[in-house]
Image: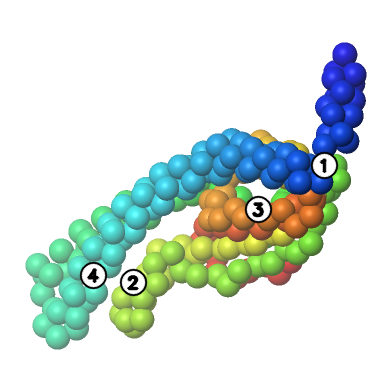
């Protein structure tokens, strides 16, 4: 029944003139784009916004603690006393608690050295999907600063952002299957951007940018 129905629509499509065929093709592409946004991009964007808000709160706490520690370290270098040492010890204890919270949030995140291999392995398991490029992005500290003393305080946190960009080629359904396979992985990572370009229907080009966090600065090359 389904095959007869599909054949019926193909026969009807063949009876259309060139202008009508173009109109139908544009309508199909627009419908697919809307479906792609509602099913994939919008849920991912909401999840990314939620995670970014959580990290922003942690970053504010870290910044505040580091500023206080840096100020007390300057005071101690000039005129150390027992009270300042006591306050410094308390702040360092708070810093440890913040680090512990940050480690808890990082549980389940994929290791930087694994991310490229895992994303590439999922490509090979997805039918009719080609990998065009896989590129590591520069490693960045979770909190960047140009101040020397603050930078030393940040080194106590030692959290780094490892980004990766992957470019794929295939049909819309292949892309959808790949994204579903990524969501089913036992590891987590943060979604930054997802771009879809229809070069020549039905072939599409997708660029995905993701990142993970770790306490290691080094990047293992692709």
Q: Is residue 191 left or right of residue 204?
A: left
Tell me if residue 154 can be seen: yes
**Marks 1 and 3, Cα distance to the nearest angstrom?**
29 Å
| Quarter residue 37 falls in | top right
Bin the neighbour count of mark 2 within 10 Å (Cα to Cα): few under 14, some 14-19, many 20 and up.
some
Q: Which residue is mark 2?
A: 153
Q: Which residue is mark 4?
A: 67
Decide which of tag 1 and tag 4 comes sooner along the chain: 1
**Marks 3 and 2, Cα distance to the nearest angstrom?**
41 Å
Is 222 located above or below residue 24 in the figure? below
Q: Is residue 44 left or right of residue 12?
A: left
Q: Is residue 216 left or right of residue 157?
A: right
Quadrant where the C terminus lies? bottom right
Bin the neighbour count of mark 4 within 10 Å (Cα to Cα): few under 14, some 14-19, many 20 and up.
some
- Name of the residue lying farthest toward the bottom: 78
| Nearest to viewer (mark 1 / mark 3) | 1
Decide which of tag 2 and tag 4 comes sooner along the chain: 4
Judge by depth and name the residue closer to the eye, 41 or 189: 41
Q: Which residue is mark 3?
A: 196
Quadrant where the N terminus lies? top right
Q: Secondary structure at mark 4?
A: helix
Is 38 located above or below residue 4 in the figure? below
Decide which of tag 2 and tag 1 comes sooner along the chain: 1
Q: Is residue 17 left or right of residue 74?
A: right
**Marks 2 and 4, Cα distance to the nearest angstrom?**
9 Å
Q: Which mark is residue 17?
A: 1
Q: Secondary structure at mark 1?
A: loop
Which residue is drawn at the image coordinates 51% and 63% (left, top)? 161
């Amino acid at each position: 029944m389904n095959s007869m129905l599909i054949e019926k629509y193909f026969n009807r499509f063949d009876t259309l003139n060139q202008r009508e065929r173009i109109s139908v093709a544009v309508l199909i592409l627009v419908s697919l784009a809307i479906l792609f946004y509602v099913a994939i991009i919008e849920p991912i964007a909401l999840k990314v916004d939620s995670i970014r808000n959580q990290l922003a709160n942690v970053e504010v706490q870290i910044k505040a603690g580091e500023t206080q520690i840096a100020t007390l370290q300057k005071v101690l270098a000039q005129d150390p006393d027992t009270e300042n040492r006591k306050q410094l010890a308390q702040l360092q204890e708070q810093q440890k608690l913040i680090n512990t919270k940050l480690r808890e949030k990082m549980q389940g995140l994929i290791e930087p050295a694994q991310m490229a291999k895992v994303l590439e392995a999922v490509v090979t398991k997805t039918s009719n999907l080609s990998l065009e490029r896989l590129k590591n992005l520069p490693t960045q500290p979770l909190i960047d600063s140009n101040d020397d003393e603050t930078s030393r305080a940040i080194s106590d946190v030692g959290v780094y952002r490892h980004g990766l960009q992957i470019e794929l080629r295939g049909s819309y359904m292949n892309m959808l299957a790949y994204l579903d396979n990524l969501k089913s992985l036992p590891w987590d990572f943060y979604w930054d951007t997802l771009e879809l370009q229809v070069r020549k229907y039905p072939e599409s080009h997708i660029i995905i940018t993701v990142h993970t966090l770790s306490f290691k600065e080094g990047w293992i090359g692709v």
